[in-house]
Image: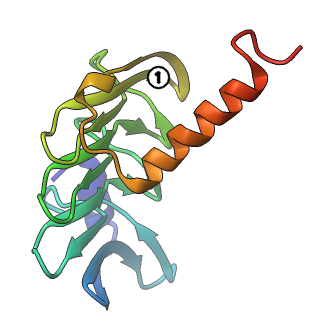
Amino acid sequence: MDAFEEEKLNAGWHSVIQVEEHGHRSRETTYLYHPKERSLRIVHGLGGRPAVSLTDLRTGVIIREEWRINTMHRENGPALIERDGRTGVVIREDWILHGRHHRMDGGPSIVRYDRISGAVIYEGSCIKGRLCSERRYPENDLHPTARELAARERWKKNRLLKGPAGPT
């Protein structure tokens, strides 16, 4: 239990977990509730649980985890983690502090992985939400989705229309 959790529980707040099922997905959200203030805040769960988790009920894979205290926030790991629903492979990690992409240890704050192999296909480094550098690994992107393929085609088409030097 971190200092925030201890402080809130000692001040009369209660942890409430809400579970909703929509088709083949289940969403679990953790709130802190104070009876006198009648306010509800989405927070990371007590004991190291994410604030929001989305599970594929067909496979049992947790496909999305969000760590937050109202805004996305996690100090010692990625605040947002997404997994492929079929394979369980992590496909996205976003390191966010106080609602902005930022990573304290100097590593990339935005990381994307191939859906099957788990190899890194993109890394972006941000400081306080501003993108400082990015690196793509197209040789590792062996299993793009239909949406990603369509986006690549649109980009290529726009590039051809504008020409290599851009608009004139």
Q: Residue at x 41, y 67 (%)?
A: 42
Q: Residue furthest top?
A: 165
Left or right: 131 with respect to 149? Answer: right
Residue 5 found in image quarter = bottom left
In which quadrant of the rendered image does the C terminus lie? Answer: top right
At a point 55% along the width and 40% down the height, the residue shown is: 153
- Residue 18 % position (x, y): 30, 84
Residue at horizontal 31%, vertical 22%? 137
| Residue 103 occupies quadrant | top left
Which of 4 and 12 lies nearest the eye of the viewer?
Answer: 4
**Disc 1: which residue:** 126
In front of the other: 66 or 134: 134
Amino acid type indicated by mark 1: Cys
Q: Position of residue 109 (x, y in %)?
A: 36, 28
- The image quarter containing residue 154 is top right
Percent coordinates x, y for residue 147 in the rendering: 46, 54
Residue at screen point 44% across, 47% down: 148
57 relative position to 148: left or right: left
Single out the residue that lies furthest toward the right.
168
Judge left or right: residue 86 versus residue 142.
left
| Foreground pick, 118 / 22 | 118
Location of residue 87 with respect to 9 vertically, above or below: above
Query: Is residue 87 something one can see in this rendering?
Result: yes
Q: Secondary structure at mark 1?
A: strand
